[in-house]
């Protein structure tokens, strides 16, 4: 009798029950994801908020449950409506809904966990494009191995579900229940209440920095808040009042977060600091130096080179002994930084000496050509990737050009796509040996050498095992194996150091090393799970943006001032021409950003001794590394000790955007 009564109650409230079951399973998956990926309930690296008290955790979980019930309840209603129109009833439709919704969420969480196990949560399409040299297609092609592996696993799961559904549909008991139907007034009433209340809760949550931080990582909250935001976008500028950052002028389509702020028009288009100011174009010190022949120049760019490489040891052996010796005999600049975490933008910054497409500064290639230098390009990557070769002048007339596309048959991986083309360190050295025998060293020579050893996955077939004998397979790269990943990476950097040693040896054999300015630097850093991330281009921290910068000139004095990649060309030329030391502004700061200038995710300033001021455009919060604190935008502007740092950072971003707009309109 009890079982019959229970069956009756369950069947009466079956729609509500099935939504609750689905939500509870999804909650379990998502909360586990948030805990293991973001350490949301314990606190993690550079994490502004975490829920560590019982009250905070209970409140967050209740909010999480509410948004899940709202979203999946609405989806269930649509599912049941369609099933009713198709005259499908009974337990089978509830089983179908539960399984499909859980699998869909599981696949999405799995993909996020797979991708975000490598990257921070800043990752988006713009960052993926930047990592692909500006091409989404190239980035996806490069990531095809991981995508294929995960897609295969998804297909297996789907096949299993289809098999189970097919078996259930043939069960006699299931077929009998499928003929039953009944009223669902309670479900309809509860759903209506949720629909009415959810916009209110969403608006409150969107204005609460503390709980919004965690909720934005949930599928249900993001879909609901984004949907409501679109509905509230009355001026059709792409921003409403439910997402964050909010539209601060709901009835003015010219004012919205990220809008180009036009200086001195009396309108604060982007919502920061009032109307933009016209900032003067930075003076070009190189324009004051007369182009003339000087020492030969060898510029070596190391892919994904970390700033701590010089002091790193494996089994009591220094990883980069040659570079370490060069640094000791010459100059190693401690506080050197990339402006972005992407190869293409870093190379453009090095050669073009600025972060925007502008003619306000003399390009490195143009200055050296005017000084009578001859050019040799030897690169282990495809320099057409992201149009680097064309933009910086590598393919100008008279330049001897060799890259991975030139020697495509010597690539280390099967793929011929631009983002995947790489040459071995031995092949690069072979080409250098050929070229130095061809050039006339009675004339000033410029060599650009790009070494790809440090590129993910940090090893390739037949890479020399200089420090370890078991490089990690690509399929095993994950946080649990971070020590193995690091050892493989350092072995790769040992290979890069070998090339540097061979270059130095060749120059000494030709008796031209003492008449050569040798500059070695990284295009960006690399996280190796030591700060919770893997890779580059998605976080503005030291591991991803601080780089080695070594010059075989002991007379350079930079002290603790920061140096950006846009400064390297002038520093190199001054050394080669014997000019006085590089002039450094005592208030100099290096500007960094993630994303692009028009739509950055984050931007930062690096000041003396590596002190970083960071602004997150998504949360409108500042981070101050010396204080290790996060502060909301408005609170920062009220802080007399911090507001100047915040204002300088935002003003430089606005200025760069404006000058780029003026140059390219």
Image (cartoon, grey):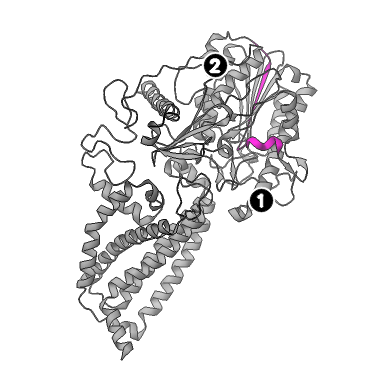
Q: Residues within 10 Å of mark 1 (few under 14, many from 20)?
A: some
Q: Which residue occupies 54% across, 31% down?
A: 611
- Any mark on residue 390, and which? none
Q: Which percent across, then down, holds residue 211? A: 38, 51
**Residue annotated with mark 2:** 366
Quarter of the picture containing the N terminus is bottom left
Q: Which quadrant of the structure image shows residue 595?
A: top left
Q: Residue at x 66, y 44 (%)?
A: 489
Residue stretch in magenta: 293-311
Residue 485: image location, x then y, percent: 64, 49
Q: Is 113 placed left or right of 571 in the picture? A: left
SS for tag 2? helix
For mark 1, what is the residue?
A: 483
Q: In the rendered structure, does residue 224 fall within the stretch colored magenta? A: no
Q: Quadrant of residue 409?
A: top right
Rendered view: 565 above or below 366: below
Q: Which part of the image, by quadrant, shows the C terminus?
A: top left
Q: Position of residue 447 (x, y in %)?
A: 65, 23
Residue at 40% x, 26% y is 651
Q: How many marks?
A: 2
Query: In the visual, does 155 lie left or right of 312?
Result: left
- Front residue of 257 and 348: 257
**In this picture, residue 287 sits left or right of residue 402:** left
What distance separates the C-alpha of mark 2 from that of mark 1?
44 Å
Q: Nearer the viewer, residue 443 or 245?
A: 245
Residue 228 in view, yes or no? yes
């Amino acid at each position: 009798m009890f079982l019959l009564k229970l069956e009756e109650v369950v069947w009466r409230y079956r729609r509500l029950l099935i939504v609750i079951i689905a939500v509870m399973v999804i909650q379990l998956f998502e909360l586990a994801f948030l805990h293991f990926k973001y350490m949301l309930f314990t606190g993690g690296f550079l994490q502004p908020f975490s829920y560590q008290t019982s009250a905070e955790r209970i409140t967050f979980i209740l909010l999480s449950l509410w948004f899940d019930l709202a979203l999946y309840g609405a989806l269930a209603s649509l599912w049941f409506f369609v099933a009713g129109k198709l005259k499908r009833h009974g337990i089978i439709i509830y089983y179908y809904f539960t399984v499909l919704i859980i699998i869909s969420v599981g696949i999405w969480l799995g993909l996020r966990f797979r991708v975000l196990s490598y990257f921070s949560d800043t990752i988006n399409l713009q960052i993926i494009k930047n990592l692909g040299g500006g091409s989404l297609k190239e980035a996806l092609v490069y990531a095809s191995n991981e995508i294929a592996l995960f897609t295969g696993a998804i297909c297996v799961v789907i096949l299993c579900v289809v098999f189970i559904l097919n078996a259930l549909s043939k069960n006699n008991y299931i077929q009998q229940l499928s003929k039953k139907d009944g009223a669902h007034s309670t479900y309809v009433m509860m759903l209506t209440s949720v629909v009415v209340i959810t916009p209110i809760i969403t608006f409150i949550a969107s204005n609460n920095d503390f709980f919004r931080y965690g909720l934005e990582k949930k599928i249900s909250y993001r879909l609901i808040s984004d949907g409501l935001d679109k509905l509230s976008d009355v001026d059709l500028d792409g921003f409403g009042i439910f997402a964050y950052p909010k539209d601060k002028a709901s009835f003015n389509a010219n004012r919205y977060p990220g809008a180009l702020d036009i200086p001195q028009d009396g309108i604060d288009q982007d919502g920061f600091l009032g109307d933009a100011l016209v900032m003067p174009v930075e003076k070009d010190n190189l324009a004051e130096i007369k182009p003339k022949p000087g020492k030969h120049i060898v510029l070596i760019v190391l892919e994904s080179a970390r700033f701590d490489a010089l002091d790193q040891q494996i089994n009591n052996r220094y990883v980069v002994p040659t570079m370490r010796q060069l640094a000791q005999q010459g100059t190693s600049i401690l506080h050197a930084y990339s402006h972005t975490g992407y190869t293409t933008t870093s190379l453009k910054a090095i050669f073009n000496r600025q972060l925007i497409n502008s003619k306000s500064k003399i390009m490195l290639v143009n200055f050296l050509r005017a000084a009578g230098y001859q050019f040799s390009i030897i690169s282990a990557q495809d320099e057409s990737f992201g149009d680097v070769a064309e933009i910086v002048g590598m393919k100008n007339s008279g330049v001897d050009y060799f890259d991975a596309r030139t020697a495509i048959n010597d690539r280390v991986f099967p793929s011929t796509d631009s983002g995947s083309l790489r040459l071995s360190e031995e092949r690069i050295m072979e080409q250098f040996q050929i070229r130095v025998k061809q050039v006339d060293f009675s004339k000033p020579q410029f060599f650009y050498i790009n070494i790809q050893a440090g590129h993910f996955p940090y090893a390739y077939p037949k890479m020399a095992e200089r420090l370890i004998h078991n490089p990690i397979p690509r399929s095993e790269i994950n946080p649990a194996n971070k020590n193995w990943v690091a050892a493989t990476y350092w072995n790769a950097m040992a290979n890069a150091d070998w090339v540097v040693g061979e270059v130095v040896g060749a120059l000494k054999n030709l008796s031209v090393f003492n008449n050569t300015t040798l500059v070695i630097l990284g295009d960006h850093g690399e996280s190796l799970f030591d700060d919770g991330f893997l890779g580059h281009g998605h976080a503005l921290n030291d591991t991803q943006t601080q780089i080695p910068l070594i010059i075989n000139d002991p007379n350079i004095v930079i002290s603790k001032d920061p140096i950006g990649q846009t400064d390297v060309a002038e520093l190199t030329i001054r050394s080669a021409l014997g000019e006085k030391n590089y002039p450094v502004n005592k208030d100099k700061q290096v500007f960094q950003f993630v994303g692009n200038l028009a739509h950055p995710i984050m931007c930062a300033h690096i000041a003396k001794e590596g002190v970083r001021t960071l602004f997150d455009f998504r949360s409108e919060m500042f981070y101050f590394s010396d204080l290790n604190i996060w502060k909301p935008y408005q609170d920062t502007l009220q802080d007399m000790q911090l507001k100047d740092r915040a204002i300088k950072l935002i003003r430089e971003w606005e200025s760069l955007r404006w000058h780029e707009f003026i140059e390219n309109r």
